[in-house]
Image (spheres, rainbow, N blue to C red):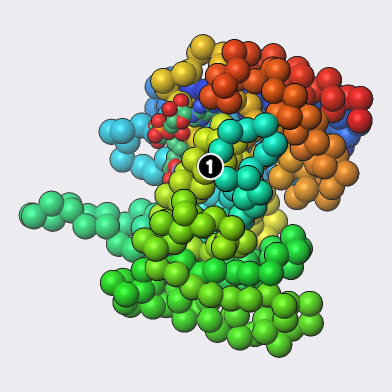
């Protein structure tokens, strides 16, 4: 029995969450789902985007599923998802960019893992109003940079990848990204000597060039490791490469906790129409199953989604279909139950 915190959030968050939970409930595994609140609607009702109780439930669970939230523009405290990442110590944000059969995209066979440092950088939360305007502090530490670089080599090995690319802007951010870059190469030196890692090639790119190559030559990338904001931007770009934000899942991982969420937000433009693509949330649930060690179940769930995508009959509008979120999820559930 796994205890799972479920935070549906706002906009399409609850829609893709409901669809995904319905599929998970058809699993052979037993889940105890605990729903908890966070986000804009929660703020409007309680004055708080992340009630203390939500954090405690998430802290004590085996894993957390998170839908999406709408950011509160006037809010003075950070977004609930950022607080969750920080408070749960989720320092690594794994964002796979994968092309799937039947999904119209710029290239086939894209399979990249973007690894986003999730604890610092421009997300330090240290901003200050000045007489001229405002400043934001970009914090880059050796500890976090080395830690995320190690995650990159471990993930490369686990996934049979043979290249890790560090992405930074050390030509301008000489000191801060200088630390990131040097930390990456220090860790790369260590791994060069390690059994099982010697075949992993390493290189580096400035983020502007990396953004260009992601569009023109995505196959040159296998694992990309980068700082917080660059990872945020590159992962939306990567999603665009493989069919859109409805296809991009993510895993926020720490030493003893994991939170799984689509890369997308609350999508106010399509919310409450019931047409959001549930694939990113379903694939995030696959990442959660892998995190829990349930590799067979994760594989089965991904295969069920692949069958539906391949068939191309029950798809949401972003994928060129006319089906609803729930219809697409039911089609996935049917194959999942059969497998
Ligand atoms: P968004 O990701 O919500 O939407 C961008 C575009 O992608 C929209 O056109 C939307 O319709 C489309 N899209 C996203 N997910 C989709 C899906 N599953 N199926 C089909 N189409 C999909 O980004 P935004 O519009 O810039 O932000 C909206 C709100 O979400 C903001 O308040 C933002 O801060 C927040 N946000 C939250 C998270 C999160 O909860 N982790 C992530 C990103 C943005
Ligand atoms: C994401 C989102 C968040 C981020 C926002 C909502 C705070 O864009 O998960 O990619 O910037 O990390
Ligand atoms: Mn983002």
Residue 162 x %, y %: 69, 69
Q: In this rendering, would 289 be left or right of 147?
A: right
**Rendered position, 297 above or below 111:** above
Q: Secondary structure at mark 1?
A: loop
**Rendered position, 302 above or below 193:** above
Is residue 246 shown to the viewer in this render? yes
Q: Nearer the viewer, residue 308 or 12?
A: 308
Residue 210 x %, y %: 44, 61
Quarter of the view holding residue 197: bottom right
Q: Nearer the viewer, residue 302 or 214?
A: 214
Q: Nearer the viewer, residue 254 or 172?
A: 172
Ligand 2's image quarter is top left
Residue 32 x %, y %: 79, 31
Q: Quadrant of the C terminus?
A: top right
At 58% from the left edge and 76% from the top edge, which residue is drawn?
202
Residue that carries the numbered disc 1 in the rendered image: 106
At 69% from the left edge and 14% from the top edge, which residue is drawn?
327
At 8% from the left edge and 55% from the top edge, which residue is drawn?
132
Q: In this rendering, would 171 be left or right of 98?
A: left
At 58% from the left edge and 33% from the top edge, which residue is drawn?
104
**Rendered position, 143 above or below 98:** below
Is residue 42 shown to the viewer in this render? no
Quarter of the view holding residue 156: bottom right
Extreme left residue here?
Answer: 131
Neighbour class for label 1 at 10 Å: few (<14), some, many (≥20)?
some
Q: In this rendering, would 303 be left or right of 274?
A: right
Quarter of the view holding residue 63: top right
Residue 199 x %, y %: 72, 78
């Amino acid at each position: 029995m796994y205890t799972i915190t479920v935070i549906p959030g706002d906009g399409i968050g609850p829609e893709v969450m409901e669809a995904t939970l319905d599929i998970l409930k058809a699993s052979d595994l037993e889940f105890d789902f605990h729903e908890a609140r966070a986000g804009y609607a929660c703020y409007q009702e309680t004055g708080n985007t992340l009630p203390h109780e939500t954090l405690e439930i998430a802290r004590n669970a085996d894993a957390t599923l998170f839908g999406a939230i709408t950011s509160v523009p006037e809010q003075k405290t950070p977004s609930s998802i950022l607080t969750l990442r920080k408070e749960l110590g989720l320092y690594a944000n794994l964002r796979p960019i994968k092309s799937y059969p039947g999904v119209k995209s710029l290239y086939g066979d894209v399979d990249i893992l973007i690894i986003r440092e999730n604890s610092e950088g421009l997300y330090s939360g240290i901003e200050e109003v000045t007489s001229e305007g405002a400043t934001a502090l970009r914090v880059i530490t050796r500890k976090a940079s080395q830690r995320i670089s190690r995650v990159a080599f471990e993930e490369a090995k686990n996934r049979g990848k043979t290249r890790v690319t560090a992405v930074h802007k050390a030509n301008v951010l000489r000191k801060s990204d200088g630390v990131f870059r040097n930390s990456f190469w220090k860790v790369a030196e260590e791994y060069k000597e390690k059994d099982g890692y010697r075949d992993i090639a390493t290189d580096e790119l400035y983020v502007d060039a990396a953004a260009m190559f992601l569009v023109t030559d995505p196959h040159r990338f296998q694992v990309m490791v980068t700082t917080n904001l660059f990872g945020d931007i590159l992962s939306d770009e990567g999603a665009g490469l493989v069919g859109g934000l409805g296809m991009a899942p993510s895993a926020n991982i720490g030493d003893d906790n994991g939170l799984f969420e689509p890369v997308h937000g609350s999508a106010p433009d399509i919310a409450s129409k019931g047409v959001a693509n549930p694939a990113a949330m379903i694939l995030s649930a696959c990442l959660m199953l892998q995190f829990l060690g349930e590799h067979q179940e994760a594989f089965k769930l991904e295969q069920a989604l692949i069958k539906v995508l391949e068939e191309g009959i029950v798809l949401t509008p972003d994928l060129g279909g006319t089906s609803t979120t729930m219809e697409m999820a039911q089609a996935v559930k049917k194959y999942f139950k059969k497998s």
